[in-house]
Image: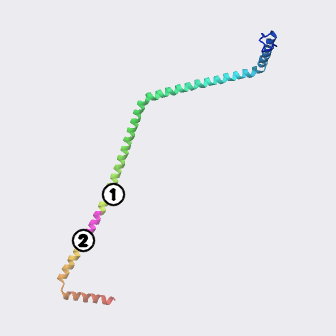
């Protein structure tokens, strides 16, 4: 080996030993690391293949989604019309239901009113009958008071007492 600081050119012996050392190093690397390196690149190739397949599938799904969105956007006016028609039909049905309930409620109110009117009529007739009887009794009492004399009153008392006496 040559001295490193003298400035002499290297000799063939100085170059052979490092070259031989390098060749041995590479031969050992190839001999012992060939299978792990081959396995690494095979696994990496498989991972890349799966990633490419996943990317292609994701692209296909995105394309299908884009196509579906395009169809949905194109169908929006028809969908709007269908929804509008459905809402109008629902509103019309609800209107008919409300009208039917209102008719039934009106009939119920009408029958209740007729019943109340009938009860009021019976009560009014009873009140008139009572008033007529009371007025007849009052007028009869007034007529009797004017028509009766004091001796008639004494005779009525004696007759009452004589009838009440034997039964007591």
Q: CA distance from mark 1 to mark 2?
A: 28 Å
Q: Secondary structure at mark 2?
A: helix
Query: Residue at 20% across / 81% down in the picture?
Result: 144
Quadrant into which the C terminus falls: bottom left
Q: Position of residue 114 (x, y in %)?
A: 30, 58
Residue labelled with disc 1: 112
The residue segment tinted magenta is 120-133
What kind of secondary structure does the magenta stretch mostly adopt?
A: helix
Q: Is residue 52 left or right of residue 135?
A: right
What is the x, y in percent for residue 102?
34, 49
Q: Is residue 109 above or below residue 3?
A: below
The answer to which of 144 and 15 lies nearer the viewer is: 15
Q: Residue at x 24, y 73 (%)?
A: 133
Residue 52, picture quadrant: top right
Q: Is residue 160 left or right of residue 50?
A: left
**Is residue 50 covered in magenta?**
no
Q: Secondary structure at mark 1?
A: helix
Q: Does residue 43 sit above or below 6 in this rendering?
A: below
Percent x, y of residue 31: 78, 18
Residue matched to label 2: 131
| x 19%, y 79%: residue | 142
Q: Residue at x 78, y 21 (%)?
A: 32
In the image, residue 164 lies at what x, y percent? 30, 88
Q: Is residue 116 above or below residue 47?
A: below
Question: Counting residues from the N terminus, which is met first, the one under dot 1 or under dot 2?
Answer: 1
Question: Residue 88 is drawn in which quadrant?
Answer: top left
């Amino acid at each position: 080996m040559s001295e490193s600081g003298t400035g002499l050119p290297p000799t063939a012996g100085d170059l052979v030993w490092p070259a031989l050392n390098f060749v041995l190093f590479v031969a050992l690397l190839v001999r012992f690391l060939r299978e792990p390196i081959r396995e690494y690149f095979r696994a990496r190739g498989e991972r890349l293949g799966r990633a490419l397949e996943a990317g292609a599938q994701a692209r296909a799904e995105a394309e299908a989604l884009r196509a579906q969105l395009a169809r949905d956007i194109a169908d929006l006016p028809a969908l709007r019309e269908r929804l509008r028609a459905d809402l109008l039909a629902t509103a019309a049905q609800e209107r008919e239901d409300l009208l039917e309930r209102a008719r039934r409620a009106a009939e119920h109110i009408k029958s209740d009113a007729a019943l109340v009117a009938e009860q009021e009529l019976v009560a009014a007739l009873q009140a008139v009958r009572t008033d007529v009887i009371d007025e007849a009794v009052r007028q009869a009492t007034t007529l009797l008071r004017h028509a009766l004399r004091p001796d008639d009153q004494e005779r009525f008392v004696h007759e009452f007492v004589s009838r009440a006496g034997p039964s007591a």
